[in-house]
Amino acid sequence: MTDQFANKTSSPVWRSDRPARSATRWVTMVGVWTLVFLLVWNYVRSGQSAPLLDPSAQPRPVTPRGELTDDERETIDVFKRASSSVVYLTTSEFGRDFFSLKPFEIPSGTGSGFVYDRDGHIVTNYHVIQDADRVLVTLADQSQWYARHVGSEPDKDIAVLKIEAPSDKLFPIRIGESHNLAVGQKVLAIGNPFGLDQTLTVGVVSALGREIQATTGHRIRDVIQTDAAINPGNSGGPLLDSAGRLIGVNTQIASPSGASAGIGFAVPVNIVNEIVSELIRYGHVRKPALGIVPVDERLTRRFRLNGVLIDSVAKDGGAAKAGLRGMLVDGRGYLRQLGDIITKVGDTTVSSPLQLRDALEGYKTGDRVKITYRRDDRAFVVTVELKYLN
C-alpha cells in the first residue's frame, strides 16, 4: 500500500499543473497593466486635444419670455394688494433666573395674522398666542408693535389682539364670504412659514364641510380644506379667494411629518367675522346655554352613567325655570340627591359635556329647545329657553 501511494503522488500529471498556472497569471497581469496604460494614455491625449477652459466664453443670449398669462397677473395683483394686510407674530414667555431671580424673556414661537380694521385689531389663531406672555407684531413695512390681548374663542381657534399703530400703517384685509364657495375654486394663502415672512402659496378648495378638532377638544364644523401649502408659521394667516378677499383663517394641516402634505384647513370667514365682532365688543363670545354646570365626564363614567350629569343649576337660567335640578350634598359631604342626567338635546344624543356644547352650537339666545333627561330611572322631556353665558 505504501508503494502505491508513493506512485500516485509522484505522477507526471501533478507536476505538469504548476507551470500552466504560472503562465496564466503572467498573461493576466500583462493584460491588466496594458489596459491601465491605454486608459491613462487616452486620458492624457484627450486633455491635450480638448482644453477644459475657454477664454472666449460669453453668457448665452436670453430667450424672450413673452407676456404673463392672465392668471399670473391676477395672482401677482392679489398678492400685492393683500400682503400689506398680513402680519408676522413672534411670541415669548417670561422666566426668572433660579439664582439671581432676575426676569428674562424666552422666544416661544411664531405665527401669522392679519389686520382686521384701522383701529389696530389683529386676528390670528388662538393656539398661536395660547401660552404667550408677550406678542410682537411685525407689519408689512417691518415696523414692530407689542400687542394686547382683546379676547379669544378657543373652541374656534380664533384670537383678537390690538396694537397702537398709526392708522396710515394699517391696511385692513378685505372680507369675503364662505357660504357660496365651490370645490375647485382657486385660493391663495399668505403667511410666514418657518419665519419666512410674506410667503404666497396657491391652490384650490379641495373640500368643504370638513370637521376638525380645536385644542379644547371642541369640534369646528364647516371647515374649508385646501391643497395650498400651509406650513408651521402659516397658522393664523388669511386664505383668500381670487378676488383677494378673506374666505378663511388657516389653522391646521394634516401631516404625519408636521410639514405641508397638501391637506390644510381654514376656519371659514362667516364664522370668523361673527366671532371677531363679539370678541371686540365683549372680550368673549356669548354662547347660548342651558344654565347648568355639568359634572366632570370622568366622574360620570365612574358612576357608570350614560349622559350628562348636572352638578348645579343657575338660579336665573333656563334649566332652573324648566325644573331641572343638580346634585345635593349635605354639610358632611355626603351625596343626598343625584342630579338629573341629560341624554338628548332636541334629537341629538349627548353623553359628555363636550357633546352637549356641540349640540347647542346651532342655537341662538332666546331659542327654546327640548331636553330629554333621566331622574330616578324615569325619562322626562322639558322645553328650556337658552340664554347667553356670561
Image (cartoon, rainbow, N blue to C red):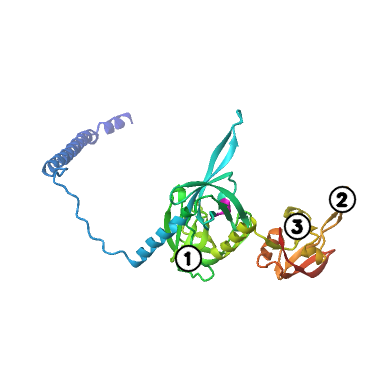
Find the magenta span and give its range. 123-127
Look at 81% across and 58% down and name the residue there. Answer: 326
Residue 124 among those drawn in magenta: yes
Q: CA distance from mark 3 to mark 1?
A: 39 Å
**Circle 2: residue type:** Tyr
Q: In this rendering, would 31 be left or right of 379?
A: left
Looking at the rendered structure, the secondary structure element under dot 1 is strand
Q: CA distance from mark 1 to mark 2?
A: 57 Å
The amino acid sitting under disc 3 is Pro
Near-viewer residue (383 or 225):
383
Residue 306 visible in the picture: no
Tell me whether the residue at label 1 lies in contact with that at label 2, contact meaning CB atoms closer than 8 angstroms.
no
Q: Classify the position of the C terminus by image quarter.
A: bottom right
Residue 334's tag is 2
Q: Residue at x 77, y 62 (%)?
A: 317
Quadrant of residue 201 within the rendered picture: bottom left
Q: Residue at x 14, y 39 (%)?
A: 44
| SS at circle 2 | loop
> Are there few (<14), some (14-19), or many (20+) residues within 10 Å of tag 1?
many
> Does 124 appear above or below 385?
above
Are the residues at dot 3 and dot 2 in contact (C-beta closer than 8 Å)?
no
Dot 3 falls on a residue whose secondary structure is strand
Mark 3 vs 2, N-terminal side: 3
Q: Callout 3: few (<14), some (14-19), or many (20+) C-alpha neighbours within 10 Å?
A: many
Q: Pinpoint residue 378: horizontal percent, then vertical percent.
A: 83, 67
Q: Which of the labelled discs sits on residue 205, or is there none?
A: 1
Location of residue 344 by image quarter:
bottom right
Q: Which residue is painted at 76% across and 55% down in the image?
A: 295
Label 3: which residue?
294
